[in-house]
Amino acid sequence: MAGAFFLEVFDATVVVTAAPAMAADLGAALSDVGIAITAYLCAVAALIPMSGWLAARFGGRRVFLLATVLFAVASVACALSPTLWALAGARVLQGVGGALMVPIGQLIVLAGTAKTDLVRAIAYLTWPALVAPVIAPFVGGLITDLWGWHWIFLINIPICALLLLLGVLFLPREPVVGPSRLDGLGFAVAASGIVALVLGLEWVVTPNRWWLGAVLLGVAAATTTVTVVRGRRVPGAILDFRGYRFPTYRLTNSSGMVYRACVLAAPFLIPLLYQAGFGWSAVDAGAVMLWLFVGNIAIKPFTTPILRAIGFRWMIGIATLVVAATFVAFAALPAATPVVLTCAVMLVSGVARSIGFTGYVTIQFADVPKELMTGANTLASTFVQLSHGLGVAFAAASIAVIELATAGGPELAVRASFVLLAAILVVSLVGVLRLPRDAGAHVRARG
């Protein structure tokens, strides 16, 4: 399941560095290649609400294996695409596969894990989400330079084959209990709202599409309101908001969503700063970012002891403050900063973001009863995917607005965006401070 999580997040970001090569090969404008990224994000975000119903209807094991096959087939179609629109269509299919692999895989893990083992299980599931966007720019640039952009999709095939083999061998054949009637209206409203939100954020800062972006954001606000009301009142709603009555679940899907969006915006901003501001190559900027990956991995063996020593509130709070401090450091570092110091800041940021992610994701399902787990997992997975897209979209929008308002160039805009994200992280701590001191105590206990 960690491998599936890695694939889904990696493919959401790896296309960015290959965009110029794609545009040249497919005979398209560079600005138009963004449709390949947007199509994937929209498909993943829109289809995730359906995952819980499909798992109940056909069984989690069966849907996961079929989704993996679809992801592999769509990856081949992406690599063989002769036109940009063919690529966009293949990316939609790939997004459908990713939308089903990750939440259903997580649901299978949660169903088979005792509360006292959640810390370790969630640690295995979360680190790929941290690693993928960090290494994607470097790996994508390297593969594109050496073999061509087609190979950023073809490398998925052996990974999918391994996932299929492990799934057939180890996934349990759980009984299919049969779901309630599909909430078709709720799905249509939720999916349209998600797509409107993703596209609206992208287009609202585009000069010739800002009005359409504003309209879409209005549509997203209206459909979100309807979805939340139905999720609280209508039995069998496609997105179940009943888990929000538990403070630990509510925290992860409010403050935790903000934290995730801000943290996942960093791999988008850092290459821009070092390339547009400092004149580095894409490969050099990606190589320095690998220190975020080192920090993510190096701290993993210690996250469980840290959690059991200081608890969720202190763990998440300190991690958030450290991440915010590193964002301010990124904004302040001059072009002449020694590479060693830059790598050290990256390392500290990677350590802190890993600790914060582990804290948020582990406490998320601490108090959710089994009868609400499927709905809670589906909603949480939807928010996770939205935070991926929203973090990058917000960062891109802030750069565009700041650059227009200050006329200071892209470097100043990127630096100011880092400061803005740091401030938002600090504000998100309000929800953390309201968390009871003993929250998730039974999860911290040793199994």
Image: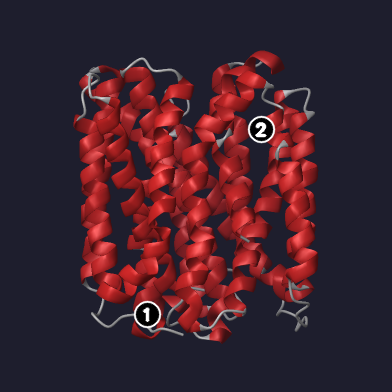
Location of residue 152 (image quadrant): top right
Location of residue 187 (image quadrant): bottom right
Tags 2 and 1 touching, CB below 8 Å:
no
In front: 281, or 213?
Answer: 281
What residue appears at the point 72 percent right and 77 percent down from the top-left corner?
181
**Residue 418 shown left or right of residue 301 in the figure:** left
What residue appears at the point 65 percent right and 66 percent down from the top-left corner?
104
Instruction: Please say whether residue 214 is visible from this viewpoint.
Output: no
Q: Position of residue 133 (x, y in %)?
A: 49, 42
**Residue 247 shown left or right of residue 388 in the figure:** left
Picture disc at residue 282: none
In front: 273, or 135?
Answer: 135
Q: Position of residue 178 (x, y in %)?
A: 76, 81
Per the image, the residue denoted by label 1 is 444
Disc 2 versus disc 1: nearer the observer: 1
Q: Of marks 2 and 1, which one's residue comes earlier in the chain?
A: 2
| Amino acid type, label 2 | Ile
Q: CA distance from mark 2 to mark 1?
A: 40 Å
**Residue 314 shown left or right of residue 388 in the figure:** left
What residue appears at the point 39 percent right and 18 percent down from the top-left corner?
280
Picture disc at residue 152: 2
What residue appears at the point 46 percent right and 40 percent down from the top-left corner?
134
Element class at badge 1: helix
| Amino acid type, label 1 | Arg
